[in-house]
């Protein structure tokens, strides 16, 4: 099931102009799982900006409270992605060693992209190369 384009646009419009929120929002959009959940939707608020454009605000404070209280049960990788998004958006500390363990290649790439976006993506480009074993591990 794909995400509703209107929700994606409203989230991106809200986060536009602030690299940290853009990074966190795009990470959640790429991950998809959280934006499909009704319990997560209760932590977002659809509204309008000053120009009358629809936006959807993520209440990061309520997200943090819910995660830390265990009110958003999920797989360890989904929780890691959400904790990283929280760290990017509001500076909530996250142990990257723990958070990155167990992420698949797609989520790891999404996190790498989010970190670059938070650091102002126009200055940095990430290119992920195919994984290769060190020469000493290759069959000879």
Image (cartoon, helix red, strand yellow):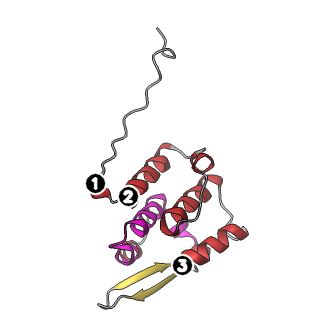
Dot 1 and dot 2 residues touching (CB under 8 Å): yes
Q: Earlier in the sequence, mark 1 or mark 3?
A: 3
Rendered view: 22 above or below 59 = above
The residue indicated by pointer 3 is: 59
Tell me how far mark 1 sits from mark 2, CA to CA: 8 Å
Q: Earlier in the sequence, mark 3 or mark 2?
A: 3
Residue 41 sits in which quadrant?
bottom right
Which region shows up in magenta? Answer: 10-37
The residue indicated by pointer 2 is: 119
The residue carrying pointer 1 sits among few (fewer than 14), some (14 to 19) or many (20 or more) residues within 10 Å by Cα, namely few
Q: Count up the numbered dots.
A: 3
Q: Nearer the viewer, residue 17 or 76?
A: 17
x then y, percent, for residue 86? 54, 65
Question: Callout 2: helix, strand or loop?
Answer: loop
x then y, percent, for residue 114? 42, 57
x then y, percent, for residue 130? 39, 33
Q: Give the residue drawn at x 43%, y 26%.
A: 132
Residue 116 is left or right of residue 106, and the answer is: left
Q: Is residue 21 magenta?
A: yes
The residue carrying pointer 3 sits among few (fewer than 14), some (14 to 19) or many (20 or more) residues within 10 Å by Cα, namely few
Tell me how far mark 1 sits from mark 3, CA to CA: 28 Å
Tell me how far mark 3 sits from mark 2, CA to CA: 22 Å
The residue indicated by pointer 1 is: 123
Question: Callout 1: helix, strand or loop?
Answer: helix
Question: Callout 3: helix, strand or loop?
Answer: loop
Residue 65 sits in which quadrant?
bottom right
Q: Which residue is farthest left?
A: 122
- Of tags 3 and 2, the one toward the viewer is 2
x then y, percent, for residue 62? 61, 78
Q: Nearer the viewer, residue 11 or 88?
A: 88
């Amino acid at each position: 099931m794909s995400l509703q384009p209107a929700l994606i646009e409203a989230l991106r419009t809200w986060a536009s102009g602030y690299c940290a929120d853009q990074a966190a929002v795009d990470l959640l959009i790429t991950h998809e799982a959280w934006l499909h959940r009704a319990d997560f939707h209760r932590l977002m608020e659809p509204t309008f900006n000053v120009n009358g454009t629809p936006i959807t605000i993520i209440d990061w404070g309520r997200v943090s409270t819910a995660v830390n209280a265990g009110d958003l049960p999920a797989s360890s990788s989904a929780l890691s992605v959400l904790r990283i998004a929280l760290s990017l958006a509001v500076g909530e500390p996250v142990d990257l060693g723990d958070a990155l363990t167990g992420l698949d290649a797609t989520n790891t790439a999404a996190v790498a992209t989010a970190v670059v976006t938070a650091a102002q993506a126009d200055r940095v480009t990430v290119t992920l190369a195919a994984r290769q074993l060190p020469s000493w591990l290759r069959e000879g």
